Amino acid sequence: MSDADFDAPAVRQGITPVSRAGFFRKKSVRVLAAGLLLVAVCAGVSALVAQQLQRRTVVFNMKGTIDLFMQQSARRQLNEESARAMTLRFDQALNASLDAWQQEHDDLILVPPAVVRPALDITPQIQADIARRMQETP
């Protein structure tokens, strides 16, 4: 090819459109990559937020705890008034302990028969807290 083949009209018609097509191709790739990156970042942030806001399900054996209290109080052979006062203290301690756990952890507390899949059992922690509260209250 000689220099005569590369005159201004030939360059405008032949080379320029090819280079523009390459430029748009590159720009579209950059726009697509930026869009995919934006979608990935948004999905990651959404997953983190959903994980932080999702409530855990825990179980508490209410029946077992009440049965244990009844067995322990029956051994003490209290008169009716003392037994009633202790039952009232137990009920208040039980409710306060469950409320405190729920407020601190924001978990959904269910009884074991209501849960199909294995869940964290908080019964020992709640029973220990009830015992502490019962000892604090005269």
Image (tube, grey):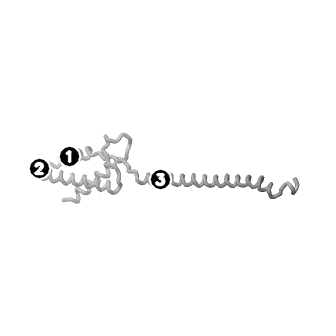
* Residue designated by label 1: 70
Residue sitting nearer the eye, 34 or 21? 21
State the CA–CA distance, disc 3 to disc 2: 57 Å
Dot placed on the residue nearer the N-terminal end, 1 or 3: 3
> What residue do we see at 88% from left, 55% from top?
2
Between marks 3 and 2 in the image, the one whose residue lies nearer the viewer: 3
State the CA–CA distance, disc 1 to disc 2: 14 Å
Dot placed on the residue nearer the N-terminal end, 1 or 2: 1
Three-letter residue code for mark 2: Glu
* Residue designated by label 3: 46
Three-letter residue code for mark 3: Ser
Neighbours of disc 3 within 10 Å: few (<14), some (14-19), many (20+): few
| Marking on residue 137 | none
State the CA–CA distance, disc 1 to disc 3: 48 Å
- Tell me, yes or no, whether the two marked residues, 1 and 2, touch with CB atoms within 8 Å: no
x%, y% of residue 28? 64, 53
